[in-house]
Image: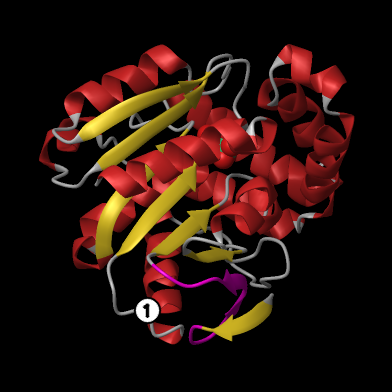
Amino acid sequence: MSLVSIGEISLNTFDQGSGAPLLLVHGFPLDHSMWRGQINDLSSRYRVIAPDLRGFGKSASQDDKVTMAQFADDLAALLDALDVGEPVTYCGLSMGGYIGWQFVQRHRDRLARLIQCDTKSKPDDDEAQATRMKAADHVLKHGPETLVATMMPKLFAEANRSSQPDAVEATREVMMNTAPSAIAAALRGMAERPDVTNELSQIDLPALILCGEHDAISPPDEMRKIAAAMPQARFVQIDGAGHMAPLEDPQAVNAAIIEFLSDT
Ligand code: MLT
């Protein structure tokens, strides 16, 4: 891992391997370590780039709000800083997926393919927006404990919560150690993310839409619809996994990614 300057901030970034570049973008409120099941395995075949987003992990920043567009622009600046001229495969999970839609809109020329894991194309409704804004204030005043306690049961498939205690605990720890300011800033940014559903039909990229069978946040039925709306997308369900499919079943997820990258 090293700190890569992208202007006024630096992003703590894993960058290893050679071959086609694969950019792994974590969910909320996590860091690059959620990709640990991909990082070693896939960096023997591809150049794997996995940053901590602005404010998360060891990428410090002090924003009140970070939009999905800002995160996308940070990632384009990161590719510049790393001298990645070749179009990349963008792979995001959940919030990383919301950022992915913005990356497509703003930096299409930097993309060869798109992998969207356990994410949504629809925005928050009024109630979800209000909940996020309240959660942002609460985290700033009292720390992440309540938010973490609310989110944890939704992240892993029920069976994996008891069979994968190390992954569950590591995820909880990352969330608890995330800066409250970063959590609040991303919550505010996610609350105002746009609806991209009507734009899916214009995404002219080979795409892999991947979803855990038991994802309680972005369920497979919703993600099947996303894949159906995209002209070059395939849908893969990860059986037995939840929202954290890449962490819960790295073998199945890596196999789907490798197959997609070799076919497209
Ligand atoms: C994530 O995993 O990134 C979050 O669940 C996204 C969200 O809160 O909408």
In the rendered image, which quarter is residue 27 located in? top right
> Would you say residue 9 sits in the magenta stretch?
yes
In the rendered image, which quarter is residue 249 located in? top right
Looking at the picture, tell me which residue is in the foreground, 37 or 65: 37
Residue located 80% across and 37% down the image:
167
- Check disc 1 and give the amino acid type: Val
Residue 221 placement (x, y as % from top left):
39, 12
Tell me the magenta residue range: 6-19
Label 1's element? loop
The quadrant of the image that shows the N terminus is bottom right
> Would you say residue 64 sits in the magenta stretch?
no
* 131, above or below 74, in the image: above
Mark 1: few/some/many CA within 10 Å (<14, 14-19, 20+): some
* 212, above or below 67, in the image: above
* 11, above or below 40, in the image: below
Residue 132 in view (yes/no): no
Residue 176 placement (x, y as % from top left):
83, 47
Looking at the picture, tell me which residue is in the foreground, 154 or 38: 38
Quadrant location of ligand 1? top right
Residue 141 placement (x, y as % from top left):
81, 48
Looking at the picture, tell me which residue is in the foreground, 44 or 203: 44
In the rendered image, which quarter is residue 32 located in? bottom right
Horizontal side of residue 117 vs 252, given as left or right: left
The residue identified by callout 1 is: 84
Image mark count: 1
Residue located 56% across and 62% down the image:
43
Residue 250 placement (x, y as % from top left):
63, 37
* 95, above or below 252, in the image: below
Residue located 11% across and 41% down the image:
202
Residue 48 in view (yes/no): yes
